[in-house]
Image: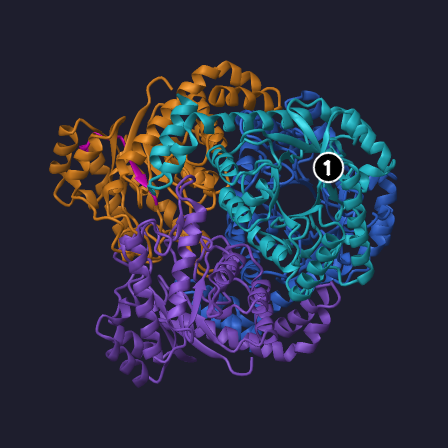
Chain colours: A orange, B blue, C purple, D cyan
């Protein structure tokens, strides 16, 4: 890619825990300290923030800190999982009061993003979905969700609304679970500024081919944002990129060029036990290495190889370029 | 459901094999014999046929046999996997000659269906997809496929074209892998007579909630046909319905009523080692039992329960009704 | 089973959270209050406790409370996940100081169990395993773990040491991941009082057949304890028993009788959003219903059916008995 | 590894089909032609054969052909899946006549291996297991299987009996499904010449860490043979090595050295659509590249890294060595 812009999220310096260790593997840092530390990670020029958790000290304070640190805000995510009130959903909650709170919080997130000079917000609706059979009216959930997103998207059409799909977790099955479902949701809102964040780990977890999903999102005009991490396909492990997969991530770099993606590449990892900066920096170096490898192999060579159905010759080229 | 119509497919009496036993666990019967035996399975009033394999003796012969047996033809499936020429895809093949053959075969299938009095054909494009990373141009595959389906759907708008999605097998990842992807494909063809066959085993394999997919398909006007079987979620095991799951299939029966599905319920099993008639008959009895259970619990009771977010009370009702 | 004894764990009334909501879906209750509430759940006569979290107020206090509540202590689990010091393992930690702390804590757990009149402790070593490739020396981890268990088991041979295997979570892959691996661990300790807790949800998650694992554990003399819950097979969802599966749990009840299991059936659920008592009570009623169903069908009938390879006739019997 | 010996199996030139294309993607070659072609694949010095299919023309003919081609026979596999008579199991069949046939066929396989100068036979019992709940008596199946293996192993103690475990396929769940289960089976036979073939694709499918399984097999003295291929973890896709994974296969090469494995590395792929020779040759080059990479990084460096719990520094080294 001609110029890659890397970001990461403030949560890497948060209280990283799991259901068996709610107090966390380490203590979360105050947001201003997180911003400073993120600016020091090699390769990082952008920061992803969470509204409202990261803004407890006021919007001005955050704007000032991000600018002072020499960072751009890539996106602001609205927090729809960090409070038990969302336990049965946010935009799809059966309770109109909860839906209203979710919409208002999202509108504030749009304003925070605008104040930070970011042109997009991230919606990851982790609590919208279900756990048990016979728990929700699926059509009703879908409509309620769609209507809320439409309302949110209408208030500032110049801000891009990015829906991050995920197969599951924390709910056993999410309402917006795959790239294709996310596209349908976007289209049904009737708004051009509603698109998709593809988290490549979520894509692996959902059994998708990452590049195929990226192409579908680009083709339908909905590829708005990219989250990077790796896993073993069975769960959203949020590991350093390159710790498990290589060929598919190389294909992803090829595909991002092909669809002329010019947005952020945001390293969304969850370093339970590792040094957050090391995990992010290593992931960025891996992407840089892959991008250079696409150059070495050549876009034309790959384009040509895809016209032959036979994957082995290109695998040989990749092997020679990586293992000598 | 007010009146349920059950069908099954001629393949249950075919040469049932796997990649380690290509000669099969049993010998396939001649198609006329299959038709007779299927008519004798308790509960069966419809028959699914495969074009062209089942029509080698001529169309008239089959029409006569189906009618004599007192069966209706629920659907005719076009065979896009039974010849090595499809190995890199049918409608999405890079070879225009192959695509042409696929389209022509499908048009003949439409004619065969019409001759049999069936108003729908089934397209399960098992070879359209990919195995390796860097094997196909995903956007090109998608467009080629869509154009072929459009052409096929245009020739007889009164015949419904049903695309059966499946996550994988025989290809490692199918082009049309989930219900949502299938909906997008249907919409992009621009044809109202293109819809979806939901095979509930494929839905489980893809990590979907069956009822949620049925509702999405109904909401978008694309619920055209239903295939029934059971599995352990990791693969398309094509087992007798009810051998693994109960609650989700009960929910499915509730949902089919809710969306007022009035089409066929076709038992699509693959009895490698079991008696085909026994597997089909047992599956039908299971569905009949579930349908009666929906009555005993009551649609209204279920509707009301879905307004509460709490799944336990309804689970208790189901348990009491099944285990006493 | 002639007389079934049901227990559940104090964690059902704890702060139930996930990695996105570390503060929890609800506030945890003080342990004495938990004990009282558990005694009030229909069908519960046993209580599972966690050492040391549940014993902060002293051992006597707990003993008194359990007895006053009319409960028996089924087992005491040692907490090897609730502190960041275990993040790279407990018994398999490379740090001898950490291993020593794990062993000492476990010995205290043995004493606590003895004081409570329980004859067994539970070891669920959630942090022993790895996340990344190239992270641990697998043989070293195995040996360190085994040696610690041997030491613990030697101190009071009359107390049963129950190792609860689990495929993964919180680590990406656990050291003791399957029933078979657990058997090997038990055998290598050289101690007869080391056995296995089978959590049937873990068994499903690991891709096992629950009954097959129970038989293997019984055959090798290592079936020491049983945890009950349900899930969708891809993750340890810890749901109410019967919400997803029925036939396999019926087979489990048959198998538990066959191997003459006379221990506790402990409902190990994680009711993030549901009423804990309702989830436990419903699970117990489900088991009671299944057990009665085994009687209705008859052990002899099942024994005979298993001599025929054909699963359909027994499925028919089960369907008739449940759906009429 | 000091000297790596690569083999592959005659099935790569067989009729490669699937359940939808029983006639195959290509026609199988006569065995003598297969042998000649395999000898021409770059890097291949060993050949895996199947008894009795590959020996239809007589033992002498095969011995002569293998020697003329300059190949060694790495192993002879007994065919326990290619006939419908095995449909309910071979060694674990309830029918004593079937078990006897399985044992006799295996004894003949031992003789064929001896005649070919191979010191091992491969047992992949694909039909031993079950599909449905309530289908088999698991303890009975286990004992019957074990007794047959014991008998087979006793007849020529100098020939190694290698049991190839696999999670599933063609049965829905195999009797010997994981490395740990295979170890228990070996131990229960009471024979030292019974060990395990680890097919690394089966290991991925079973959710194992390949290196951890190799170490366990080596530690228990049961690492007898290695099959190489790649997949996406959800199924035994039998793809070219390196098409999906890299880091874990690098770890595998490190581990094979560490445990001083000196046996064959047999490329067990299933090239449905690809050129068999190309898939095998590419897999071998990939392994050679990984082996050289272990040298470049250094065994000592890896050993040292494993003492730190932190996986990131070694991932950085691997990235630098592969992507520059």
Check residue A83 for magenta coloring. Answer: no
Q: Would you identify the image quadrant in which residue A157 lies?
A: top left
A29, D310: nearer the viewer: D310
Look at the numbered disc 1 and give the secondary structure of its residue. Answer: loop
The answer to whether one can see residue B157 in this image is: yes
Q: Position of residue D184 (x, y in %)?
A: 59, 57
The answer to whether one can see residue A242 in this image is: no
Quadrant assignment for the C terminus of chain C:
bottom right
Q: Is residue A227 left or right of residue D51?
A: left
Q: Which residue is mark 1?
A: D17
Picture layout, residue C81 above or below residue A181: below
Quadrant assignment for the N terminus of chain C:
bottom right
Span colored in magenta: A115-124
Picture layout, residue B246 above or below residue B163: below
Q: Position of residue B239 (x, y in %)?
A: 67, 55
C170, D5: nearer the viewer: D5
Residue at 61 percent of width and 54 percent of height: B231
C145, D282: nearer the viewer: C145
Q: Position of residue C129 (x, y in %)?
A: 41, 50
- The chain that hosts pointer 1 is D
Q: Is residue D168 left or right of residue A93?
A: right
Residue at 42 percent of width and 67 percent of height: C268
C183, A286: nearer the viewer: C183
Q: Is residue B8 left or right of residue C104?
A: right
Q: Position of residue D68 (x, y in %)?
A: 79, 25
Picture layout, residue D286 above or below residue B248: above
Picture layout, residue B185 above or below residue C271: above
Q: Residues within 10 Å of mark 1 (few under 14, many from 20)?
A: many
Q: Would you identify the image quadrant in which residue D129 lies?
A: bottom right
Q: Is residue A100 left or right of residue B222?
A: left
């Amino acid at each position: 890619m001609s110029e890659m812009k890397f970001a990461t999220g403030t949560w890497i310096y948060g209280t990283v825990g799991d259901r068996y260790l709610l107090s966390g593997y380490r203590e979360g840092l105050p947001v201003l300290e997180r911003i400073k530390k993120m600016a020091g990670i090699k390769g990082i020029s952008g920061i992803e923030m969470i509204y409202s958790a990261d803004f407890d000290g006021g919007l001005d304070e955050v704007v000032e800190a991000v600018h002072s640190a020499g960072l751009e805000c890539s996106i602001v995510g609205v927090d729809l999982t960090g409070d038990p009130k969302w336990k049965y959903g946010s935009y799809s909650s059966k309770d109109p009061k909860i839906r209203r709170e979710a919409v208002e919080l999202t509108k504030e997130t749009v304003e925070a993003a605008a104040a930070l000079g970011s042109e997009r917000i991230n919606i990851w609706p982790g609590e919208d979905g279900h756990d048990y059979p016979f728990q929700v009216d699926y059509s009703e959930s879908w409509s309620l969700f769609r209507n809320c997103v439409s309302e949110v998207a209408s208030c500032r059409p110049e801000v891009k609304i990015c829906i991050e799909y995920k197969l599951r977790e924390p709910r056993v099955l999410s309402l917006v679970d795959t790239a294709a479902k996310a596209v349908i949701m976007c289209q049904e809102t009737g708004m051009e500024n509603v698109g998709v964040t593809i988290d490549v780990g979520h894509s692996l977890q959902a059994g998708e081919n990452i590049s195929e999903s990226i192409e579908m999102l680009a083709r339908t005009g909905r590829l708005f944002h990219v989250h990077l991490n790796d896993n073993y396909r069975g769960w959203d492990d949020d590991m350093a990129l390159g710790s498990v997969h290589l060929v598919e991530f190389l294909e992803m770099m090829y595909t991002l060029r092909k669809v002329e993606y010019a947005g952020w590449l945001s390293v969304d990892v969850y370093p339970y036990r590792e040094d957050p900066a090391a995990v992010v920096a290593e992931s960025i170096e891996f992407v840089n290495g892959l991008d250079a490898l696409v150059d070495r192999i050549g876009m034309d060579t790959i384009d040509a190889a895809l016209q032959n159905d036979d994957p082995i010759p290109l695998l040989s080229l990749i092997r020679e370029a990586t293992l000598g």
